[in-house]
């Protein structure tokens, strides 16, 4: 029905940069808020950054403010996360999330969808 496909994770040294991408596809009518979460080993999944539709209002976790930038391309149904000045504590699986209105037969539903996750590892 709806797929979120992430890319861009990998291994980087502390102080380096990575750019994550997440493309949504399927029976999409519209996309509301898009966000990135992360989950480190043995810890809960937490919000990293989010961006609304329309005005594109952004919100960041305190731990990434000034280092990460979230953006979106509505024409491509894609959200990005530019990560600079990476630290070992940023190591985690990063998940894309989107709140979408989707077609279901002759109706529409609002759903929350998740990507499969992409590993980011920052070495010291």
Image: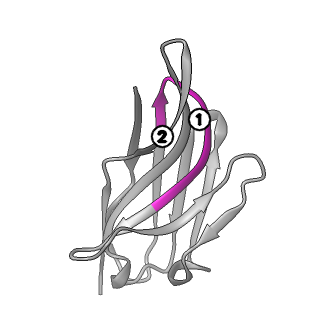
The number of numbered discs placed on residues in the rendered structure image is 2
Query: Residue farthest to the bottom?
Result: 124
Is 25 placed above or below 52 here? Answer: above
Q: In the visual, does 68 lie left or right of 75?
A: left
Residue 2 position in % (x across, y down): 42, 31
The residue under the point 35% across, 83% down is 89
Visible in this render: residue 11?
no
Q: Which of marks 2 and 1 is nearer the N terminus?
A: 2
Q: Which of 87 and 31 is in front in this view?
A: 31
| Magenta span of residues | 24-36
The residue under the point 54% across, 44% down is 99
Residue 98 position in % (x across, y down): 51, 46
Label 2 sits on residue: 23
Label 1 sits on residue: 76
Q: Quadrant of the C terminus?
A: bottom left
Question: Mark 2 touching mark 1, by CB under 8 A?
Answer: yes
């Amino acid at each position: 029905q709806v797929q979120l496909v992430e890319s861009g994770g990998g291994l980087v040294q502390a102080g380096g940069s990575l750019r994550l991408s997440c493309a949504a596809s399927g029976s999409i009518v519209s996309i509301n808020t898009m966000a990135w979460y992360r989950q480190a080993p043995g810890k809960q999944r937490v919000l990293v950054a989010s961006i609304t539709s329309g005005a594109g209002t952004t919100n960041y976790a305190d731990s990434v403010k000034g280092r990460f930038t979230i953006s979106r391309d509505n024409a491509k149904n894609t959200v990005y996360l530019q990560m600079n000045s990476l630290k070992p504590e940023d190591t985690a699986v990063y998940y894309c999330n989107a709140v979408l209105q989707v077609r279901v037969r002759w109706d529409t539903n609002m759903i929350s969808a998740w990507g499969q996750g992409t590993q980011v590892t920052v070495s010291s």
